[in-house]
Image (spheres, rainbow, N blue to C red):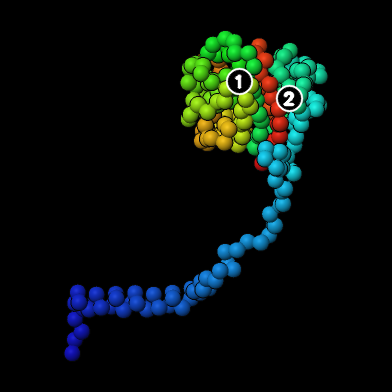
Amino acid sequence: MTFKFTKKAAAITLIAGLSAYNHAQAQETPKPPKMVPEMTEFWEPEVRVVTPGTGAAAPSDAIVLFDGKNLSQWKAKSDGSEAKWQVKDNAFTVGKGDISTKKDFGDFQLHIEWSAPDEVKGTSQGRGNSGIFLQDRYELQVLDSYDNRTYANGQAGSIYKQHRPLVNVTRKPTDWNVYDVIYTAPRFKEDGTVFTPARVTVLQNGVVVQNNVEIKGPTEYIGLPEYKAHGKAPITLQDHGNPVSYRNIWIREL
Ligand code: MG
């Protein structure tokens, strides 16, 4: 009898070969162990304990930048001399140039409270204007935006001229506004170009006004933002010529 190598025989031979190969593979590859709950539970390192503050008080691991007493954590931005803003009644008030923290920061959580001047004076950008410059470059606007129309990306809670606040939740002058800021610093490549831009989330009086927005570069009064590489940098408060007050400032490095 002669064996004829037909197409059918070829197919049978191929299937048999593959089957043998798969069988061998199955025997060589160890099966993953059966999953049990403990396999996805991580115990180390243990999560650090932080004691929360009561109300808006600083949590135990915060750096207190102003506790109502003095400006020892701040300096004049222009020349690094003593910060000369007036401290009174557990708050301090804008005057005599911008001030910056003595310490530099990267990623952080910042709590800061501000109040527009008691006397309602001026309109638009001229009323209760100050600002919180994150890393000395990116302004979170402070403005008396209570019944005071201005350009949307320049009102309280805006990232100045980049992102309007989602809502206007500004309290009237003499009442205190609260900003809680979660900030991620930009990262730069070795050649100085941007690897990842800065991002920020802002709650004003407990309401989200900036939701993880991308900062496009330093906030400019005139012109478009353009990043320049930098490292850690201070928080700077703006003297815009209006007597805005600040109190209860603390920061947590992330
Ligand atoms: Mg301003």
Q: Quadrant of the C terminus?
A: top right
Residue 15 in picture, x, y percent from top left: 29, 76
Q: Residue at x 59, y 10 (%)?
A: 121
Report the residue at 65% width, 37% height from top.
109
Q: Mark 2 or 1 closer to N-term?
A: 2
Q: Quadrant of residue 246?
A: top right
Label 2 CA crowd tier, 10 Å (few <14, some 14–19, many 20+): many
**Which of the labelled discs sits on residue 211, or is there none?**
none
* Residue matched to label 1: 173
Residue 146 image-quadrant placement: top right
- Judged from the image, the secondary structure of the residue bearing numbered disc 2 is strand
Is residue 235 visible in this depiction of the protein? yes
Q: Which residue is mark 2?
A: 91
Image quarter of the N terminus = bottom left
Residue 164 pos. (x, y %): 49, 25
124 above or below 209?
A: above
**Distance Cα–Cα, label 2 vs label 1:** 15 Å
